[in-house]
């Protein structure tokens, strides 16, 4: 296995950037997810690492070796696009052994390695069958086995679960995670599904419009988003983002609500403010506690039952859809539409953004414990 280093790697098609200059080091054995909406440059980035796409500028190193201009076959990587692409006329054994035979691995070694990977993926009973008779899940296990058996320096996977229904995605996601924990293979995994990214990634590279927005652990991008794009994109629903005005140590929010800013944050906060003290307050639905005595007030706009809990839509000013926030609440409580209620925000889970630059104002984010008030 190996590290992958991208240094100022960029891709232009004509005058248009598909990937703006990107710096990224993927550690040996690390699982890194490239996450972002369609068209943001994920596949292009992966294809540049694989050598299927030439870089416009920059340098790529795999295992310390400069492979920027190396042929894809000389980069020692396995690329998994879609786990379905098997040769129909070959048995499962032949499908898996094929790449080793192409690399002139000896017959005995091939048998040993196919048996080992078949055991790992629990497909030993399928080795003599042809792909056509297999279920979708078994076919994908075979396709994964074919990539694994090569023992490449790194795996590159482009939306490998994209074509599956939701149940099956969950199953295969768990399989990929288990495999990674067993093998610790350096992996770059592309998806537009933030749930998949959160579940699989050691780190997530959030991309938008050809540009990296943030690189961080799942907890980083969830709790400390670097900007409004990441705050909205991660989470379902995304982070609540409410615009307010900072004056005299508190932020004035819609509906006459007021969020007092902890003393130790005020200096830093003031330097990050937008024009006229404008600021965006961000918090996750689980940072809201609905109760009878809370410092903030809202009206119930809608109530979605999610099963284990309710997702309340609360209008801060009592009517305007633009002031609606989401709050996680007890599924057994009844919240008729338009009911006025009160709630508190856990200040440790509140984040702040400059409305103009859209960037996080880094107060409270770095040390959650110290910010307890
Ligand atoms: N061969 C190509 N020629 C021109 N534009 C391309 C080509 N490949 C990709 N693009 C453009 O580059 C951008 C990034 O594409 P892509 O990397 O496939 O995005 P993603 O995988 O994130 O959906 C898109 O705007 C896409 O239209
Ligand atoms: Mg793509």
Image (cartoon, helix red, strand yellow):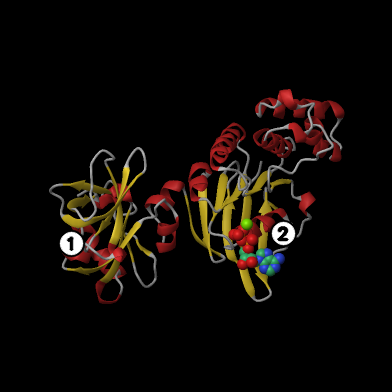
- Identify the residue shown where x is 33% and y is 52%: 284
Q: Would you say residue 32 is visible in this rendering?
A: yes
Residue 264 lies, in percent from the top left, at 22, 57
Residue 93 place in picture, x, y as percent: 79, 30
Badge nearest the viewer, 2 or 1: 1
Q: How many marks?
A: 2
- In the rendered image of this protein, does residue 147 appear above or below residue 258? above
Looking at this view, is 181 or 332 the one in front?
A: 332
Q: Is residue 278 left or right of residue 205?
A: left
Q: Is residue 198 left or right of residue 309?
A: right
Vertical comparison of 18 with 127: above or below: below
The CB of the residue at mark 1 lies under 8 Å from ligand 1: no
Q: Which residue is mark 2?
A: 68
Residue at horizontal 81 percent and vertical 30 percent from the top = 110
Of residues 90 and 305, the one drawn nearer to the viewer in this rendering: 305
- x, y (%) of residue 268? 27, 64
- Residue 173, by quadrant, is top right
Instruction: Say the numbered circle drawn on residue 258.
Output: 1
Nearer the N terminus, badge 2 or badge 1? 2
């Amino acid at each position: 296995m190996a590290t992958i280093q991208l240094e100022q790697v960029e891709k232009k098609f004509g005058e248009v950037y598909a990937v703006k200059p990107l710096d990224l080091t993927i550690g040996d054995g690390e699982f890194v997810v490239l996450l972002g909406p369609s068209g943001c440059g994920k596949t292009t980035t992966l294809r540049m690492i694989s050598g299927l796409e030439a870089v416009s500028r920059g340098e790529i190193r795999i295992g310390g070796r400069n492979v920027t201009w190396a042929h894809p076959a000389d980069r020692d990587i396995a690329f998994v696009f879609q786990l379905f692409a098997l040769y129909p006329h070959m048995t499962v054994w032949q499908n898996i052994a094929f790449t080793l035979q192409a690399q002139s691995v000896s017959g005995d070694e091939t048998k040993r390695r196919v048996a080992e990977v078949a055991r790992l993926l629990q497909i030993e009973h399928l080795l003599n069958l042809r792909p056509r008779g297999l279920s979708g899940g078994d076919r994908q296990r075979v396709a994964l086995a074919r990539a694994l058996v090569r023992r490449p320096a790194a795996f590159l996977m482009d939306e490998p679960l994209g074509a599956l229904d939701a149940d099956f995605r969950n199953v295969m996601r768990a399989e990929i995670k288990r495999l990674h924990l067993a093998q610790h293979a350096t992996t770059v995994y592309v998806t537009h599904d933030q749930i998949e990214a959160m579940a699989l990634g050691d780190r997530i590279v959030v991309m938008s419009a050809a540009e990296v927005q943030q690189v961080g652990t799942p907890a980083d991008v969830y709790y400390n988003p670097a900007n409004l794009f990441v705050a909205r994109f991660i989470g379902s629903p995304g982070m609540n983002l409410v615009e307010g005005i900072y004056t005299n140590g508190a932020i004035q929010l819609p509906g006459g609500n007021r969020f007092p800013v902890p003393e130790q944050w005020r200096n830093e906060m003031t330097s990050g403010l937008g024009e006229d003290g404008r600021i965006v307050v961000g918090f996750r639905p689980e940072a809201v506690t609905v109760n009878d005595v809370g410092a903030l007030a809202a009206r119930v706009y809608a109530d979605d039952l999610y099963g284990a809990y309710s997702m309340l839509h609360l209008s801060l000013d009592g009517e305007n859809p633009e002031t609606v926030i989401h709050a996680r609440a007890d599924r057994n409580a009844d919240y008729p539409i338009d009911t006025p209620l009160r709630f508190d925000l856990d200040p440790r889970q509140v984040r702040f953004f400059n409305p103009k630059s859209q960037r996080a104002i880094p107060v409270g984010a770095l040390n959650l414990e110290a910010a307890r008030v």
